[in-house]
Amino acid sequence: MKLFLKIWRQKDAGSKGAMVDYTLDGVESDMSFLEMLDILNEELISKGEEPVEFDHDCREGICGTCSLMINGRPHGPDSRITVCQLHMRSFNDGDEIVIEPWSATAFPVIKDLIVDRSAFDRIQQAGGYISVNTSGRPVDANAIPIEKEMADKSFNAATCIGCGACVAACKNASAMLFTSAKVSQFALLPQGQVEAAERVENMVRQMDLEGFGNCTNTGACEVECPKGISLENIARMNREYLTASVKG
Amino acid sequence: MTSGIKDADDKTIRELGEKIVEAKYGNLFQMYEKIVDENPYKTPMKIYPAVHYTMGGLWVDYNLQTTIPGCYAAGEANFSDHGANRLGASALMQGLADGYFVLPYTIGDYLSDYIRTGVVSTDSPEFDDAEKMVRERIEKLMGGRGIHSVDYYHKKLGKIMWNKCGMSRNAKELKEAIKEIAELRADFWENVKVPGEANSKNQELEKAGRVADFLELGELFAKDALERNESCGGHFREEYQTEEGEALRDDENFKFVSAWEYTGEPSKSVLHKEDLVYENIELKTRSYK
């Protein structure tokens, strides 16, 4: 199939970007979206032009590195998948496809379609961990039984891959879904209770410091999340936060 | 998940089966459906074995320290745990075991000697040499004749490895692979095309550095496979098999780990044999029959 691509090109964070048109022929329906971009880049390199830079790593939907806004939707038209799992059969011959980077103040563009998501790392570092004694006599994990329902909820929160689609989807560029998933995965388990109060306070404080917007319960994040992280997590984080401040 | 259903009929089994499979493997089945465009709950899955792991890795001592003092390699990056075979999900095992049981003791022990060292100055001949080496390598990559892209070389190398140094290999093809990779590597350094600038974000340059490494490692793989005249674990040498086509080990001559010392050219790597000593278990041939 033949595609008409409109792609955001930006030299670096300090330069002004612009949409650039490319026509790509010979795209097959069983190619992945990223393979399609690989082919475009091969063509650009052979013509002596600079390839379009985009983030990617595992290409199996697990690592959370790929991050493209396709026709106005994070990770493209299909739901519950990342861009690397999107295949060209979701498009038709002659389609115009608009490809942009995540757009948020807290995610500055590094180059072309690559944005700096280190703000997420700093939120994680502020409290996304539990303290475990690894020296002497570590406690056997099986010594603490956990109900299946709680284990599943915690696991579901932990499936967040930190891609940032929730921020890109949100009209306020809020990082509440991401932060709440990272808070919830520990808040739901006994191992997470020791540091529960300081975790939620520190992570929310860091989230605000990074310049993410506020949550207005629109729910676009949940719809666009490739891992289906539930809005319930935001409610849980709010409860955790309230409890922590009352106990203060 | 169930307390058991006696004499379940075909329909019940199917209904229950789909739910249980979904609960356990829903994410993998979704992934399959997206790639292949067929519903794996309803259509038999098309699967084939593929190389996704190389078993080996950086040489480390029992403290997980590499040959460079103070440089530790943990998890799948090192060679320590897997031997000639490696089962699914073992990546987690090695990451957890190294991170949980080994490094908390060994890194702290190493650092205890340096805790008062302070900031190390970059004003030293060693730093200058290292910096010069990296700069020259980058300049060489950027200054190629610009004929073929990095991907062109990566794909060619992949094809050689897949065809001649895969799960099943033989001496004739391994020798061919060694020659072909050496030629491809020379071609790469002469003709690779890396667009853009060296001093900005440049994914092609990043990739070129990795492919340059793969071009050395690939040849070493083939050399190692060629010198090991036995079939062991995930490495099947076609010349060494039982009458039934099973892997045939040679414990008398190859009961060792091959640790290759880097000397610049893969063909000139130096072999260090680390004997495998079994004190508590008896060496046997594993049979799945």
Image (spheres, rainbow, N blue to C red):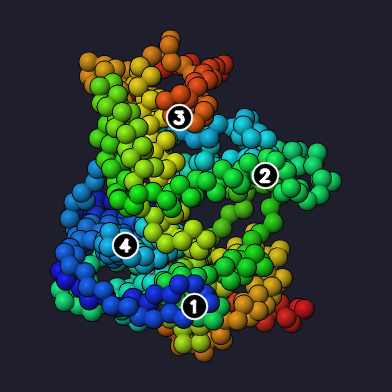
Q: Quadrant of residue B157?
A: top left
Q: CA distance from mark 4 to mark 1?
A: 21 Å
Observer able to see residue A153: no
Q: CA distance from mark 4 to mark 2?
A: 35 Å
| Secondary structure found at label 4 | loop
Q: CA distance from mark 2 to mark 3?
A: 23 Å
Question: Badge 3 is on which residue?
Answer: B265
Q: Which mark is residue B127?
A: 2
Which class describes the residues within 10 Å of circle 2: few (<14), some (14-19), or many (20+)? few
**Please, what is the three-letter code of the amino acid marked with disc 1?**
Ser
Which class describes the residues within 10 Å of circle 4: few (<14), some (14-19), or many (20+)? some
Q: CA distance from mark 1 to mark 2?
A: 33 Å
Q: Quadrant of the C terminus of chain B?
A: top left
Question: Residue drawn 38% across and 72% down?
Answer: A68
Q: Are marks 4 and 1 in contact (CB under 8 Å)?
A: no
Residue A157, image x and y in percent? 50, 67
Question: Badge 1 is on which residue?
Answer: A15
**Please, what is the three-letter code of the amino acid marked with disc 3?**
Glu
Q: Are marks 1 and 2 in contact (CB under 8 Å)?
A: no
Mark 2 or mark 3, earlier in chain: 2
